[in-house]
Image: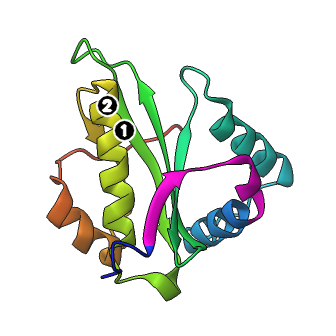
């Protein structure tokens, strides 16, 4: 685990564009996905907008170097009066794994959700993502839901 004084979780800032892009590109590569530059530019602008209903994000910075990211969103749910929080993306640089980065990023989203009064926090992962699932099984509750999408 990283020493607490060397790992900082903070909101994504305008000067983070290159590091954020590097980390998000690596995250997408894990899922064998590439996106056009326009998607990167628009997503980063949305993360900075602070607008209601827009995604927000955190960077994990270890010894001054960004090594992880998460994106999350608050949205309405028909199951509660309060909004719910969707943690969409979570990534830690493979070279920095095993130091508590993923857990710290999830806990930062938990704290943001608590501050907003969110009813819950949820996320998805692929069944083959065994490394991440080891953490998720310790920090969250696996649900029986299966995701479907339009064909």
Depicted 150 relative to depicted 77: above or below: below
Q: Residues within 10 Å of mark 2 (few under 14, many from 20)?
A: few
Tell whether position 13 is magenta.
yes
Which residue is the site of mark 1?
Answer: 112
Most foreground residue, 32 or 49: 49
- Percent x, y of residue 3: 33, 79
Residue 52 magenta: no
Q: How is the model colour-coded?
A: rainbow
Mark 1 residue crowding within 10 angstroms, few (<14) / some (14–19) / many (20+): some
Are the residues at dot 1 and dot 2 in contact (C-beta closer than 8 Å)? yes
Give the structural element (helix, strand or loop) at label 2.
helix
Q: Quadrant of residue 64?
A: bottom right
Decide: is 88 above or below 86.
below
Label 1 secondary element: helix
Magenta extent: 7-18
**In this view, 114 is above or below 57:** above
What residue is drawn where x is 67% and y is 38%? 48
């Amino acid at each position: 685990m990283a020493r607490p004084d060397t790992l900082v979780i903070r909101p994504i800032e305008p000067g983070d564009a290159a590091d954020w892009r590097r980390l998000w590109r690596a995250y997408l590569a894990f899922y064998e996905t590439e996106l056009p530059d326009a998607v990167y530019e628009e997503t980063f602008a949305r993360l900075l907008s602070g607008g209601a209903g827009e995604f927000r994000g955190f960077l994990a910075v270890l010894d001054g170097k960004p090594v992880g990211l998460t994106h999350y969103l608050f949205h309405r749910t028909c199951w509660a009066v309060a909004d719910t929080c969707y943690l969409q993306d979570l990534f830690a640089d493979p070279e920095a794994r095993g130091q508590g980065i993923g857990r710290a990023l999830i806990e930062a989203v938990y704290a943001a959700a608590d501050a907003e009064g969110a009813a819950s926090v949820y996320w998805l992962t692929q069944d083959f993502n065994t490394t991440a699932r080891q953490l998720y099984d310790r920090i969250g509750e696996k649900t029986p839901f299966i995701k479907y999408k339009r064909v």
